[in-house]
Amino acid sequence: MRGREEIEREMFNAREDLEQRLTELKHVVQEKLEVKARAQHAVQERVDRVKDAARRGVDRGREVIIRTRDGAIVYYHRARDQARQHKVLLAFVLGGVVALTLTAVFLLRRRNRRHFILR
């Protein structure tokens, strides 16, 4: 039989060993929780950055569209004013475009018809 002191010493050693392992386990758990929290925080920061970049991109896109639209309106009004001021010149240009188009169509049809007859 073992003595009382020996049993108490074993119980004391076992208790200290248990407390030490419990402390180590607490540290490991805290580290894992901290890693998870840091990872979640890092992911949230990335998500926030992406959202901000998307918002800035949308805002820039809207500005470009507005500037482009305004520029197109300005050029349209300039062209309309120029056409009103130079009506004869506009008529000559449009007549020339129509004449060239009709000539091109006529020559292409004639060339295709002649090619078809020779075969």
Image (cartoon, helix red, strand yellow):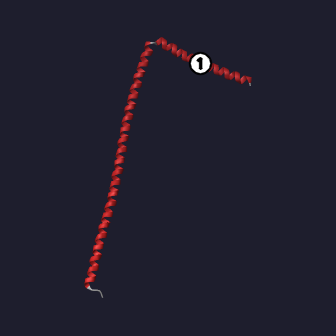
Residue 60 is situated, as x and y percent measured from the top left of the image, at 37, 35
Neighbour class for label 1 at 10 Å: few (<14), some, many (≥20)?
few
Residue 48 is situated, as x and y percent measured from the top left of the image, at 34, 46
Who's the residue at 52% across and 16% down the image?
A: 94
Quarter that holds the N terminus: bottom left
Question: In the figure, residue 113 lies in which quadrant?
Answer: top right
Q: In this view, which residue lies farthest toward the right?
A: 119
Kind of residue at disc 1:
Leu
Circle 1 residue: 102
Left or right of 105 in this view: 33 = left
**Foreground of the two, 53 or 29:** 29
Question: In the figure, residue 96 lies in which quadrant?
Answer: top right
Q: Looking at the image, is 26 positioned above or below residue 95?
A: below
Left or right of 74 in this view: 92 = right
Left or right of 89 in this view: 7 = left
Who's the residue at 58% across and 17% down the image?
A: 100
**Foreground of the two, 55 or 118:** 55
Q: Looking at the image, is 76 positioned above or below residue 62?
A: above
**Foreground of the two, 35 or 116:** 35
Q: In this view, which residue lies farthest toward the bottom?
A: 1
Left or right of 2 in this view: 96 = right
Q: Secondary structure at mark 1?
A: helix
Q: In this view, which residue lies farthest toward the top?
A: 88
Who's the residue at 40% across and 24% down the image?
A: 73
Who's the residue at 36% across and 47% down the image?
A: 47
Quarter that holds the C terminus: top right
Residue 97 is situated, as x and y percent measured from the top left of the image, at 54, 17
